[in-house]
């Protein structure tokens, strides 16, 4: 599985998983799992639309993801879960419309929904790395404000941290990261790396910085295992990512409960 | 009415059955969804639809009744979420996300296995977006009966559920079995979503669970009127969507119809936009701020 | 390991008549931390008791424990008159999980306090509706009856929550920091309203607050929480330097100025005073 045609998958997968783990730390901290799930689905619709119009899918992915992210971010105060749900269904429905209008191939659609390790072309490595670095930089800049805002929202607002700006900035980063993850892991499952492993990391340690690092590590290991397993069994990457992410969380959960009981 | 409804709509049995079951599902989704929106559980409601779909795909692999697969899958998903823990908001968020991720992963596996074993194409899209126009009469009756039961159960649970949703501690002090009521509601939501996902797909299931209640709540009338309005808005969206989808066949020379799911969702979104705009306009006119 | 007693119907003979609730030797632990240690106090009919402590001292925990929402790790809470079993305890929480748009009128919300625990759809009884009117009247909120609960101000919501808790005719009314978000004028109004309610409805009141001064005029007993310990008794007997110093574990001054009480926790350099688990001053 380390043949040259797999190199792209390993490189892009690792980069994307590191970013997902880092982003996921904040997603779990802020309780934004729904948004993390909705945005990649929106991205899928963008890819379908791009195919219909004849543009590169990545453009569609990023555009719709960003629009979804900003839209959800804008509704943080009032009934954000309803707004997220409606944005999600609207984009998925649009995706359905685009697909039926363009008569896209079934395997293409499957690949976008469930991931395709061989669907990563070498030409995409550079943009992926560049965008990931941008996102990483953004997260590093927002790290302290986000932690402060999550721990003490009123206090941080009083200190001058505009919660809306913070939310928008984070959503934008989440959107960009999601767009990158979709081709590898699939629209339906890219969010799993931002929930399972980070939630597991939080159970294992309560120190934020350590949790962040653990989150990235667990996410990368999960993706590596998924790529390897997918290669061996020919089953979709998304399946392994989804199930393994959940398992990572469950193992962490069971082991912490065990530790607490025997303490 | 000729310009609005293309000829042949009502004479088409598949369309009639589809519209009928769509309306039934719209009503029960709207009623149950009222609490989903009031309790801010939209994520769970949506997740359960996807989990139900995984159950349906699993049933396809095992070769058992798809309806059973959808409903059982979704109830199992609800159980898993409860097991992980839903007491605190953050925990609920993680529980829903983990269960959703795991179930969607399983979906990927099941769908792959299905496409391996059968030559039918388009099964992925079918499972995601439903097959409103290929519902049999038998399924229609089963779903209607099950929906009626769900509505009865909701009426039974209604007052304590409202009490618990508003003030769980006061309800507990007053002797309400808070955890049991909350769990009972989650199961009802799971069953509802399972029933709707099988006919209209998980996308539409969420749209009808969340959209019409959210719009109805904006109207600001009394409780019972709001419940009725939610149901009405849901049925209207389904009816309008069916008509639009059927009509769209003749809109473009390429004879590609707009999928029903898109039309219904578009109408639900339209309803929400209209209600919100009207609300904002009336607020400005009154000059009254929110307390 | 930890003994877990929460008898609701036991040993009434050791409590004096007219006792609604008797808390005996209770420890409460949450998330591995000891929040309360060896808590002893009682509430008699008709008393107005203030539960005083700074933020995070454990007031809400104590109230929730009394309501049975938290199990004590040691000790017991005895309800000689069966008040908890018969649902004769009313609870006014600090917040309600209110979606602003919930289409519920004040009148209907208050009614939930009476029949919200009953399953099934049923028309409100005449009895319930009359009691709702009576309670809205008692808290002076008749004019709010038709308003939406989401559209009320802090003070208005407070009164509605009280009516909601009172409509089931409780013997004891527990309020969790009802004065927390009110301005001084509204605070005075609520406190005198509570005093009136106690008179007319013959209900004992136990409310938590962090500032003792707002309640001095109406309160006859105080439960003072500090340092995970509790001192309870008539106000003047508890709010004294000796008593509070033992509670805090270091020297504390009590200063009275213009009818107001100021508890000055002093500096720790004067040294800790010998530990006494708790003091119940009768």
Image (spheres, coloured by chain):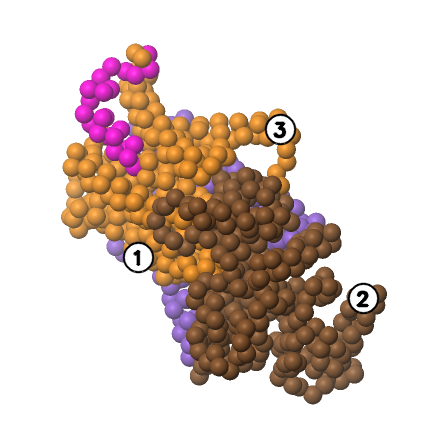
Chain colours: A purple, B orange, C brown
For disc 3, the marked residue is: B286
| Residue B278 percent across, percent down from the top left | 53, 27
User: CB under 8 Å between callouts 1 and 3?
Assistant: no
- Mark nearest the camera among 1 and 3 is 3
Left or right of B63, for residue C204: right
Q: Is residue C43 magenta?
A: no
For disc 2, the marked residue is: C259
Q: Nearer the viewer, residue B224 or C71?
A: B224
Q: Nearer the viewer, residue A213 or B66?
A: B66
For disc 1, the marked residue is: A229
Give the structural element (helix, strand or loop) at label 3: helix
- Mark nearest the camera among 2 and 1 is 2
- Mark nearest the camera among 2 and 3 is 2
- At 28% from the left edge and 33% from the top edge, which residue is drawn? B22
Report, in whole angstroms, how far the alpha carbon at label 1 lies from the one at label 3: 62 Å
- The crowding category of the residue bearing disc 3, from other C-alpha atoms within 10 Å (few below 14, some 14 to 19, many at least 20), is few
Can you say which quadrant of the picture contains the N terminus of chain B?
A: top left
Report, in whole angstroms, how far the alpha carbon at label 2 lies from the one at label 3: 47 Å
- Residue extending farthest top: B2
| Residue C164 percent across, percent down from the top left | 53, 52
- At 79% from the left edge and 66% from the top edge, which residue is drawn? C260
Left or right of C260, for residue A90: left
Query: Disc 3 is attached to a residue of which chain?
Result: B
Does the rendering let one see residue B171? yes
Determine if marks 2 and 1 fall on one subunit: no
Hey, which quadrant is residue C201 in on the image? bottom right
Tell me which segment is drawn in magenta: B3-25
Determine if marks 1 and 3 fall on one subunit: no
Does the rendering let one see residue C33? no
- Residue extending farthest bottom: C274
């Amino acid at each position: 599985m380390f043949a040259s045609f797999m190199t792209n998958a390993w490189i892009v997968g690792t980069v994307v998983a590191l970013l997902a783990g880092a982003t996921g730390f904040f997603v779990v901290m802020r309780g934004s799992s729904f948004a993390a799930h909705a945005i990649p689905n929106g991205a899928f619709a963008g890819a379908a639309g791009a195919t219909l119009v004849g543009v590169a899918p990545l453009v569609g992915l990023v555009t719709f993801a960003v629009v979804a992210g900003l839209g959800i971010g804008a509704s943080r105060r009032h009934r954000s879960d309803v707004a997220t749900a409606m944005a999600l269904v609207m984009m998925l429905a649009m995706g359905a419309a685009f697909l039926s209008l363009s008569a896209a191939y079934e395997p293409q659609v499957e690949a976008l929904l469930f991931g395709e390790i061989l669907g990563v072309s070498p030409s995409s490595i550079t943009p992926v790395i560049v965008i990931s670095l941008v996102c990483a930089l953004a997260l590093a800049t927002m790290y302290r404000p986000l932690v402060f805002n999550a721990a003490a929202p009123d206090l941080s607002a009083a200190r001058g941290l505009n919660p809306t700006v913070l939310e928008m900035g984070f959503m934008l980063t989440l959107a960009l990261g999601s767009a990158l993850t979709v081709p590898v892991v699939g629209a339906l499952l890219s969010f799993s790396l931002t929930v399972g492993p980070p939630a597991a990391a939080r159970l294992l340690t309560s120190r934020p910085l350590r949790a962040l690092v653990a989150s990235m590590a667990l996410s990368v290991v999960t993706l590596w295992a998924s790529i390897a397993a997918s290669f061996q069994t020919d089953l979709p990457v998304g399946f392994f990512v989804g199930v393994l992410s959940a398992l990572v969380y469950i193992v962490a959960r069971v082991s912490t409960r065990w530790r607490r009981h025997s303490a | 009415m000729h310009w609005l409804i293309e000829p042949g709509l009502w004479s088409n049995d598949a369309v009639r059955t589809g519209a009928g079951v769509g309306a039934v599902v719209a009503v029960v989704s709207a009623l149950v969804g009222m609490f989903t929106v009031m309790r801010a559980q939209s994520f769970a409601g949506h997740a359960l639809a996807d989990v139900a779909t995984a159950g349906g795909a699993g049933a396809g692999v095992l070769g058992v009744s798809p309806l059973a697969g959808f409903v059982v899958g979704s109830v199992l998903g609800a159980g898993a979420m409860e097991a992980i823990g839903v007491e605190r908001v953050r925990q609920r968020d993680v529980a829903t996300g983990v269960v959703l991720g795991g179930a969607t992963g399983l979906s990927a596996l099941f769908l792959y296995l299905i496409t391996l074993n059968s030559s039918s194409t388009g099964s992925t899209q079918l499972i995601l977006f439903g097959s409103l126009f290929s519902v049999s009469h038998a399924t229609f009756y089963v779903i209607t009966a099950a929906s009626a039961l769900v509505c009865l159960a909701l009426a039974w649970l209604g007052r304590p559920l409202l009490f618990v949703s508003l003030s769980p501690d006061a309800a507990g002090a007053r002797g309400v079995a808070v955890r049991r009521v909350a769990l009972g509601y989650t199961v009802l939501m799971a069953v509802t979503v399972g029933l709707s996902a099988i006919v209209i797909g998980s996308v539409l299931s969420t749209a009808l669970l969340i959209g019409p209640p959210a719009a109805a709540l904006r109207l600001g009338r009394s409780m019972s009127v709001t419940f009725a309005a939610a149901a009405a808005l849901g049925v209207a969206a389904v009816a309008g969507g069916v008509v639009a989808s059927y009509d769209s066949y003749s809109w473009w020379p390429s004879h590609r119809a707009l999928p029903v799911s898109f039309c219904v969702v578009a109408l639900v979104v339209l309803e929400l936009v209209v209600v919100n705009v009207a609300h904002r306009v009336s607020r400005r006119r009154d000059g009254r701020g929110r307390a | 390991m930890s003994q877990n007693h929460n008898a609701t119907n036991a040993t009434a003979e050791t409590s004096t008549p007219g006792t609604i609730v008797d808390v005996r030797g209770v420890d409460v632990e949450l998330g591995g931390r000891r929040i309360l240690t060896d808590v002893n106090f009682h509430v008699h009919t008709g008393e107005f008791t203030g539960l005083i402590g700074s933020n995070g001292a454990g007031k809400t925990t104590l109230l929730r424990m009394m309501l049975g929402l938290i199990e004590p790790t040691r000790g017991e809470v005895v309800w000689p008159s069966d008040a908890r079993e018969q649902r004769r305890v009313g609870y006014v929480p600090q917040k309600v999980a209110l979606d602003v748009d919930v289409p519920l009128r004040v009148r209907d919300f208050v009614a939930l306090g009476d029949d919200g625990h009953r399953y099934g759809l049923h028309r409100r009884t005449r009895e319930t509706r009359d009691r709702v009117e009576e309670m809205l009247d008692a808290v002076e909120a008749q004019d709010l009856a038709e308003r939406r609960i989401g559209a009320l101000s802090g003070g208005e919501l407070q009164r509605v929550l009280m009516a909601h808790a009172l409509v089931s005719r409780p013997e004891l009314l527990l309020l969790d920091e009802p004065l927390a978000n009110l301005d001084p004028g509204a605070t005075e109004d609520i406190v005198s309203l509570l005093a009136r309610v106690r008179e007319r409805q013959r209900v004992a009141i136990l409310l938590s607050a962090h500032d003792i001064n707002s309640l001095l005029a109406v309160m006859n007993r105080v439960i003072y929480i500090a340092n995970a310990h509790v001192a309870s008794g008539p106000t003047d007997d508890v709010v004294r330097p000796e008593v509070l110093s033992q509670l805090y574990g270091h020297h504390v001054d009590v200063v009275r100025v213009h009818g107001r009480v100021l508890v000055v926790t002093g500096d720790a350099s004067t040294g800790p005073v010998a530990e006494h688990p708790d003091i119940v001053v009768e």
